[in-house]
Image (cartoon, rainbow, N blue to C red):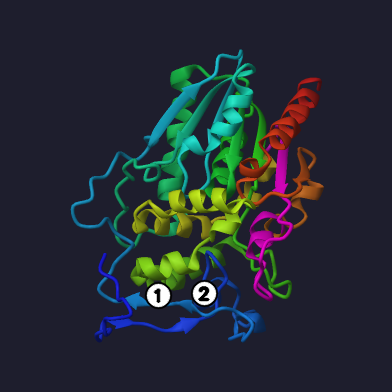
Amino acid sequence: MTMTTSTQRPDASRRRRKGTIRAGLPTLALAFLVPAGAVPSGAQANPDRVPRILEQDSTLNNLVDPPGYETGRLGKLGRVRTSGYGPGSMILIPGLGFGGDVFEPLTERWSERFTLHAVTLPGFGGTPAPPSPPSGTSFGEQTWTDGALTGLERLMEREGLDDVVVVGHWLTGTQLALRLAAAHPDRVSAVVLLAGSARWTSPDPSVPVEIPLENRVARVDRGLAPKWFRTVTRETWDDNNFLPQDYAANPVLGLRHWREAARPPLHVWVRYLCEFFAQDVTLDLDGLEVPTLLLHPGLEGAYVEPGANYLGAYTRRSWGRVAEDHPMIRARTIPDTRVILWADRPDAVAEAVKAFLDESSQG
């Protein structure tokens, strides 16, 4: 992708400007998601926030496959890495940006109890993404997310997995884990959500958490996707997406995970993220019949620009009262952690999961 640098002059097709940000969802895009009239004052320019690059390139189309991109097959997982030798079965689904290898600190600790299947969603970890759907397909169709769900179901069938524990991480890993459990309560024994995020939610408390699904979908299809993500440059994406300190409190680990998340092609990130914005997994939880552990990151000491605690919005506010009221969900916090909780405190995460599974198995 060609990007404007400080030594280049933008031509008429390129627009370079500075603006404020809600990481993972720039403030320009915020207006497309929240109900009309509900755009908070925090979306206005704030002198306390660091200006971010908001460059667009009208010659780009991140909603289709780049020229020459070799696609995979819809319904097939990117990769499955099997490890461990324990009698139990576990499927681990990473969040957006990551391959199954991100779970290694945990799989090493669970290898005696489980045979572990760490999956990589197609398009991440160097694997090919499915073909982009035809132009005009709604992001509410969840084309790639449903394709990954089909791949997970085929994995369960192929390996004969019953009584399986499903671990879902962060964005999209959460949705896949919960939907798999809701669809197969006879084969899934428990769900573990690591930094789980139910849906897009504004960090501004004046913006409602509950947005009708049809409104979410329409605002992505008509606004967010064509008016922002379609022409966003890689430079703008990296400047506005999640930061190293969002992934881990340890700066070295945070940087390593940021590099991994920044590697996938831009159109892959765009499609999965737009599908995440165009869903609300809380609407599917009436069918959740298995014990579920929701582990929140502590987020202590995380730098937050005024009015922009986006990590808290993704990992806590997005659940509304569901995490408190649903009889099958138990929530707790692992202190001194960020989105990849086990990067900083693998033992604490492993012990919390063990305690939960031990208690759940006793009925």
Q: In the picture, which quadrant includes the C terminus?
A: top right
**Residue 299 lies in magenta, yes or no?**
yes
Q: Secondary structure at mark 2?
A: helix
Q: Residue at coordinates 44% horizontally, 58% vertically from top-left?
A: 139
User: What segment is highlighted magenta in the picture?
Assistant: 288-316
Q: Quadrant of residue 190?
A: top right
**Residue 223 lies in magenta, yes or no?**
no
What's the mark number on residue 227?
A: 1
Q: Are marks 2 and 1 in contact (CB under 8 Å)?
A: yes
Which of the two residues, 227 or 100, is positioned nearer the viewer here?
A: 100
What's the mark number on residue 36?
A: none
Image coordinates of residue 121 in percent, x first then y, are 43, 41
Which amino acid lies under the numbered mark 2 shown in the image of this protein?
Phe
Q: Quadrant of residue 334?
A: top right
Residue 221 visible in the snapshot:
no
Image coordinates of residue 8 in percent, x first then y, are 26, 81
Query: How much space separates mark 2 and mark 1, taking CA atoms?
Result: 9 Å
Q: Is residue 14 above or below residue 296?
A: below
Residue furthest front in the image: 252
Q: Is residue 214 above or below residue 11?
A: above
Which of the two residues, 336 or 307, is positioned nearer the viewer here?
A: 336
Image coordinates of residue 213 in percent, x first then y, are 58, 61
What's the mark number on residue 32?
A: 2
Q: Residue at coordinates 66% horizontally, 84% vertically from top-left?
A: 41
Label 1 CA crowd tier, 10 Å (few <14, some 14–19, many 20+) = some
Q: Quadrant of residue 150?
A: top left
Residue furthest left in the image: 68
Which amino acid lies under the numbered mark 1 shown in the image of this protein?
Lys
Image coordinates of residue 264 in percent, x first then y, are 37, 51
